[in-house]
Image (cartoon, grey):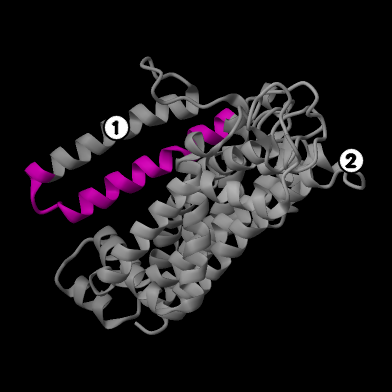
Amino acid sequence: MDTLSWPMIFGKMAIQFTPVWIALLVTFALSIQFKRRLGLYGKLFDSTVGMAGFALVAFWVFTAIFADLIITYDPLGQLSGMKNAVPGSPTTGVENAWYLLGGDHLARDVFSRMVMGARRVLAIAPAATIIAFMVGITLGLPAGYFGGKLDTALSFIANLVLAFPVILLFYLLVTPEIRVTGIPVALAAILFLFPVVFVCVLLNSRFFTSPPKRNLYVGTAAILGLWAYSGLAFNADPTGFWSMDPNLLNVFVSVVFVNAPTVFRIVRGMVMDLKARDYVAAGQTRGEGAWYIMLWEILPNARGPLIVDFCLRIGYTTILLGTLGFFGLGVSPESPDWGSTIDDGRRLLSIYPHPAVVPALALMSLVLGLNLLADGLREESLRD
């Protein structure tokens, strides 16, 4: 078989991404049809920039979901004779099969590693950002609302973390040697408890006047939350449903620890501004509890900027994960995450650029999509 030309390579890649194209088409068709009923998300489709960003992000999200259907080879598999193969090279010993984007220095398929790398990145970045937001919101709301010594203490801790160089802090937190000290587990024990507390307080404040519902919802959330907490933080889930590899725990905890103080400062500043509004005074006059006012009166009115920051922060986290992988501090050495793949390919960049360029372009396109999505959301939220 002959080496494929670039038009043929792009054509075959387009065919491999068929599940993604179908999912995108259905998503856009339904979203545009019902956009007037979908709130801020629906308004996003009135913004060209927002739609472009959403399309890029959705492309990689669906790629991560359908990765097993898209890949052409095992991303960790090695084929004889395919070391540093150029894009479109026919695979040895297999009829009508090619390494669409070439092979790397270990004869692994670059295309399959790029596709599976999306799953790695999108399995960590959004989840870690969500937990960082729960930590920041849980601490930022009372700090801004009550002020005083609580605000002073929490702000001092946040500023202390933010004063440390981010890359150096990441490097210290994810090195294998740090695991021996038990610091990642201790941080996980603290940080992973916040989502449980946040959800329980949220439900308790909402259904406080209806004890049967409150007890049911809060009890269920506490049981499920502590079950997940025991497995993720201490790997103590007897069922094995919730568990986290030590390397992944290091990376996850590091992302949450670094992002939470910034979210805290944003939430604190917004609460200090919003707590003087009339609807807050009305809630206090009705005798509503402080947490009800913070979570159900103030927080919804701060959703626009927080959603925008959430999108941007996923982009920052994606870049940080790529940086860690590039420094060899990713989830695992053989992981197909984009940072590790770029690091593998950089050694022969002047001779065989494709193993490093392909994941770099993938990383760039995802971050670009998140930034455009944030711009679109900001544009629409300002119109509310």
Q: Is residue 59 left or right of residue 284?
A: right
Quadrant occupied by the C terminus: bottom left
Q: Can residue 178 be seen in this view?
A: yes
Amino acid of disc 1 = Leu
Q: Nearer the viewer, mark 1 or mark 2?
A: 2
Characterize the local packing of mark 2: few (<14), some (14-19) or many (20 or more) Cα atoms within 10 angstroms.
some
Q: Is residue 207 left or right of residue 322?
A: left
Residue 28: x and y in percent read: 37, 64
Q: Which residue sits at x=48%, y=63%?
A: 55
Q: Mark 1 points at which residue?
A: 224
Q: Is residue 323 above or below residue 364?
A: above
Q: Which residue sits at x=52%, y=74%?
A: 375
**Of pointers 1 and 2, the one earlier in the residue sequence:** 1
Write down the quadrant of residue 236 in the picture: top left
Q: Which residue sits at x=48%, y=21%?
A: 235
Q: Is residue 268 visible?
A: no
Provide the residue span drawn in magenta.
185-213
Of 324 and 215, which appears nearest the observer?
Answer: 324
- CA–CA distance between discs 1 and 2? 48 Å
Q: Mark 2 points at which residue?
A: 348
Write down the quadrant of residue 205 in the picture: bottom left
Q: In this view, does 112 lie to the left or right of 197?
A: right
Amino acid of disc 2 = Leu
Of 125 and 183, which appears nearest the observer?
Answer: 125
Of 55 and 79, which appears nearest the observer?
Answer: 79
